Image: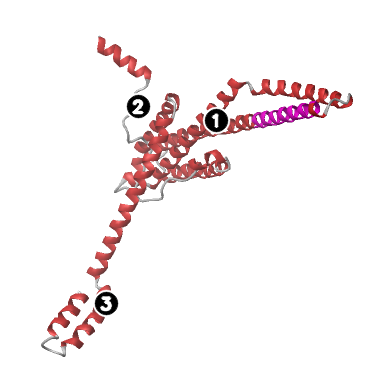
Amino acid sequence: MALATLGAGLIIGADYPLALLVGPAAYVLGWIYVPDFKIFRNWVDKKRNAQQLADAQTEAAQFVQRRDALLEQLSPHGRAKYRALSSVCRDIESASAENSLAPDEPAEDPRLRKLDELMWSYLRMLTIDESLQRFLETERRDDVPGLLKEAEAEVRDLTAEFEVSKARGASVTATDAKERLLNSRLERFEVLQKRLQRIEQTRANLAVVVSEQERLEEQIKLIRADAVASKNADVLTARIDSTVEHLHQTNKWLSEMDEFKDLVGDIPSTPVRVGYESTRPPVIEHADRKRDSVRQTR
């Protein structure tokens, strides 16, 4: 509006010099008073809210793609566990709809967003669980403890031979060769020791991850029990808040595991719910394919 006034003033000013003064003055007054107009403020707010919603939808969509990709990477057993707990969450949603904190929009109940967060944490733990198990299985096939025991005996024998060689005054060339061999086997022995230490640490980490999984499963089932048995919204809210708070401590511990730092992080803080169920078609496991094939032949 202000720009239009200024433009009109410049055009008219060609015939009426006074308009050259009126135009700029109207332009300045427009910028002073127009922002205070309710219709202008509403237009600005609406435009800003639309942009914020678009940004939130984009952020949520990117997160959902990442989550679905993680879910597809799980083993059939892992996906089955995730689906089973998702079913519990659906029961919670159904039961809590009767005492929703957002009666007009039950799907916008803030407690449901916390269910999304709980299931995201559960998915990360399933992913970490399977990764740790794959590592342990690989190391198990190599029999690192057996290799370490053999390496220790070999280093002990080579050390004795080297000391005898020096004591007998063997040639420099022969002594140097034995020393290089001994140093090489010593380094291998040290590497095997580090591998064994990592195996032991991984076993300890896996035990905690599995324990946290089981704890979270029981906590979510307890939330379902509260949602079904109690019509008190405060009781259900307190139970969910307590579970989420404990998960924050778990996530802090997970963040200390360097190889899984990219899995640590909260779901986007947006007005758009990300949910907890995959948006992609379910993967048909091998057993399901076989069963479908039998049905078709019949």
Q: Are marks 2 and 3 in contact (CB under 8 Å)?
A: no
- Would residue 119 appear left or right of 179 to someone viewing this image? left
Q: Is residue 273 visible?
A: no
Q: Which residue is mark 2?
A: 283
Q: Residue at x 44, y 39 (%)?
A: 120
Q: Residue at x 39, y 31 (%)?
A: 72
In the image, what residue type sits under mark 1?
Leu
Q: Which residue is mark 3?
A: 31
Q: Are marks 2 and 1 in contact (CB under 8 Å)?
A: no
| SS of the residue under disc 1 | helix
The residue lying toward the viewer, choosing from 42 and 134, is 134
Measure how far apart labels 3 and 1 are at the Cα level: 63 Å
| SS of the residue under disc 3 | helix
Q: Position of residue 20 (x, y in %)?
A: 18, 87
Q: Residue 173 — which label?
A: none
Nearer to us of marks 3 and 1 is 1
* Residue count near mark 2 (Cα–Cα under 10 Å), binned few <14, some 14–19, many ≥20: few
Measure how far apart labels 2 and 3 are at the Cα level: 59 Å
Which of pointers 2 and 1 lies earlier in the amino acid sequence? 1
Q: Quadrant of the N terminus?
A: bottom left
Q: Residue at x 16, y 90 (%)?
A: 18
Q: Quadrant of residue 167?
A: top right
Q: Position of residue 244 (x, y in %)?
A: 49, 43
